[in-house]
Image (tube, rainbow, N blue to C red):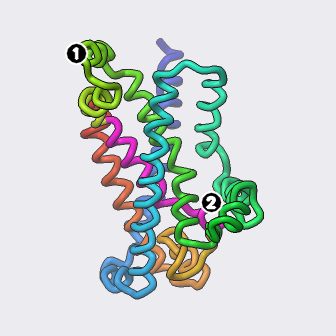
Amino acid sequence: MRGRAPRSRLALAGAAVGGAVLVLPVVGLAWRAPWGALASDLTTPAARTALRLSLVCSGWATVITVATGVPLAWVLARVAFPGRRVVRALVLVPLVLPPVVGGVGLLLAFGRRGLVGRYLSDWFSVSLPFSTAGAALAEAFVALPFLVLTAEAAFRGADRGLEEAARTLGASPWRVFRQVTLPATWPTLAAGVALAWARALGEFGATITFAGNAPGRTTTIPLQVYLLLQSGELDSAIALSLVLLAVSVAVLAGLRQRWLGAL
């Protein structure tokens, strides 16, 4: 009994320090925020452009993520094939890869002289680096694992008995997926989409490396925050940071209702 008390106090102390590490930066933002000038800081031309670009790029990144991630998740969950573990490991790479390194990889793959980019440039006159489309692609690259992992778990946990019953009644595979699998897994899939969108919205390293920081074209909110900090405009940087913080809190609140509730 005597040994448990010191261990309990040590655990509580560790939990308190960990909580402080997580909470204090958020408290610092709220404490230093220029609340009186918040509206004016968020309505400057540069801020409005960054907000618009962030919504456009993260929106297209989410479309790319859903279009590629949902089929990939379904294959990983339902189809046994050689190398499935390797593919699943590759899906996880953007989670642990430094975003800047991911941006370098995107340049080598989709740059004008890259593995695929040379053909896009020569055959279709498409250049992705340092463009809005490139920013969306960079955001999709880092956001894809969040959707794939969530969707794969949803497909694995779906009731296959209902799917088999629908097939027995003559439903096609696409109709089974659309009318049985998708409604059953929708709450978890929606959570994965929300996570992917929020991750795309806050992406910095891969975006600035692959798409650059061109105002009006690739300067999203995180990049605009960086520019403001570099120029010493701390209050404006905090105002835009609060936008990302509010989005993060909203997504987590939504996950509590949809994702955790569904599990």
Q: Nearer the viewer, residue 28 or 104?
A: 104
Question: Is residue 101 located in the magenta-colored stretch of the structure?
Answer: no
Mark positioned earlier in the residue sequence (1 or 2): 1
| Left or right placement of residue 156 versus residue 164 in this view | right
Q: Nearer the viewer, mark 1 or mark 2?
A: 1
Q: Quadrant of the C terminus?
A: top left
Label ID, residue 169: 1
Q: Nearer the viewer, residue 245 or 133?
A: 133
Of the residues shown, which amino acid type is indicated by label 2? Answer: Ala
Label ID, residue 206: 2
The part of the chain drawn in magenta is: 188-210
Q: Nearer the viewer, residue 125 or 184?
A: 125
The vertical placement of 1 against 229, above or below, is above
- Quadrant assignment, res 214: bottom right
Question: Which secondary structure lies at badge 2?
Answer: helix
Expressed as whole percent of the image width and height from the top left, the position of residue 123 reads 67, 65
Tally of numbered tags: 2
**Residue depicted at 63% across the width and 72% down the height:** 130
